[in-house]
Image: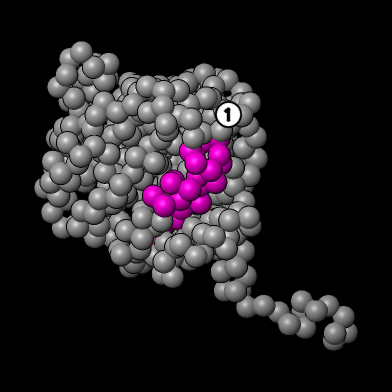
Amino acid sequence: RLGANPSTQFPSPAWLEYATMTHTLTTTPAADGFRMPAEFEPHAGCWMLWPERPDNWRGAAAPAQRAFVAVATAIARFESVTVGVSQAYFVAARRVLPETVRLIELSHDDSWMRDVGPTFVVHERGAVRGVHWRFNAWGGLQGGLYSSWDQDELVALKVLEIEGRDRYRAPFINEGGAVHVDGIGTALVTEECLLNANRNPRLKRAQIEAHLRAYLGVSTIVWLGKGVFNDETDGHVDNLACFVRPGVVCLAWTDNRRDPQYAISRDAWERLHDARDARGRRFTVQKLPLPGPLAMTAHEARGVETRRGTPPRRTGHRLAGSYINFYIANGGIVMPLLDARHDQAAAAHLQRLFPRHRVVGVAAREILLGGGNIHCITQQVPAAPLAG
Ligand code: KQY
């Protein structure tokens, strides 16, 4: 009976179905032959979110919005950028973002795309998929940074819908900023974050490791101890250390033994010194001196609204500033400028580590005041590997 069923009358070609629908897979990336590529591998683009919360960003988020525009503009020199913004801020954001940046209405609770966005994985035959972690605002009701987080929980799914990529729903709490990979089988994580009782209290270290292997497609996990002193994410590795290339790790460093950061960085250095990567090699560790110490001023603290469920901002609070929190774009390093006394040396250091990239600095104190930095507010979409 022709015409009875519109879908048989106008069957959509299989490729269209594939390109427009996000399927939720019941397998794991590793089981399907997928791996998380390193950030220094080629990208198709970058995602960000628009900062809006007045209880996290001072001055009703206006100074942070200017900093986010500067980051998006800097990254857009190297690759395409998409920013998600709530309906209330769409017009204002469109006015100040460059035309080259795509703006999409997308509800969210705050603006940390690294953590609430998908972590992309690739297959060497040319496919890209996304991992949607479970998210509890960095600690849920025991030490989390705001409540509720139900819109943040949906961001990864929405990004994957827009990107047209299939989704793995991970069965445990994790954030993109809590992991770094070298792309050849090694992951770098911290105990402070991944073993924290406010994330997955029922999972033991071995179970967390099994999940990381399954969802990142890695074979070797290198455990560092604590993250940067006072980091409100409970020690995300992306503020402490990152891969420059396989076998080379850049580590936030201070020589000041009286600074509480000294023991943390020293311990990380020792663990890295003793560790081996997925190919059994030792790491070369490059020490990148920290800015500061930096602290929140009275004026900055006053500008943040106080709300129940969000930790108050206090004058003199030591900020978790680190030059490690940079973004690796296609041919560019977009790094935070945090301290006029150290910015130039840090930029020169990064330029030596990445001789084929152009290092671009962006004034990033306003992002730091919100609890993170450039790496935390970005999420790369890898280019599909060339099949063959
Ligand atoms: O990845 C991050 N650094 C997220 C920080 C969240 C801070 C919320 N105030």
The single residue placed furthest to the top in the displayed view is: 258
Q: Viewed as shown, does residue 32 lie left or right of 262?
A: right
Q: Which residue is mark 1?
A: 306
Of residues 130 and 196, the one nearer the viewer is: 196
Residue ID at (57%, 63%): 91
| Residue 169 appears anywhere in the view | no
Q: Residue 188 is drawn in which quadrant?
A: top left
Quadrant the N terminus occupies: bottom right
Residue 145 part of the magenta segment? no
Residue ID at (43%, 46%): 63
Residue ID at (22%, 44%): 244
Q: x, y (%) of residue 320?
A: 34, 29
Q: Viewed as shown, does residue 291 lie left or right of 74?
A: left
Q: x, y (%) of residue 226?
A: 34, 21
Total marks shown come to 1
The single residue placed furthest to the front in the displayed view is: 299
**Residue 182, above or below 86:** above
**Residue 204, above or below 66:** above
**Residue 36, above or below 282:** below
**Magenta-highlighted residues:** 43-67
Task: Look at label 1 and name its amino acid.
Answer: Thr
Q: Viewed as shown, does residue 32 lie left or right of 341?
A: right
Q: Viewed as shown, does residue 230 lie left or right of 276?
A: right
| Label 1 Cα neighbours within 10 Å, binned few <14 / some 14-19 / many ≥20 | some
Quadrant the C terminus occupies: bottom left
Q: x, y (%) of residue 308?
A: 63, 26
Q: Secondary structure at mark 1?
A: loop
Of residues 213 and 193, the one nearer the viewer is: 193
Residue ID at (54%, 29%): 145
| Residue 48 appears anywhere in the view | yes
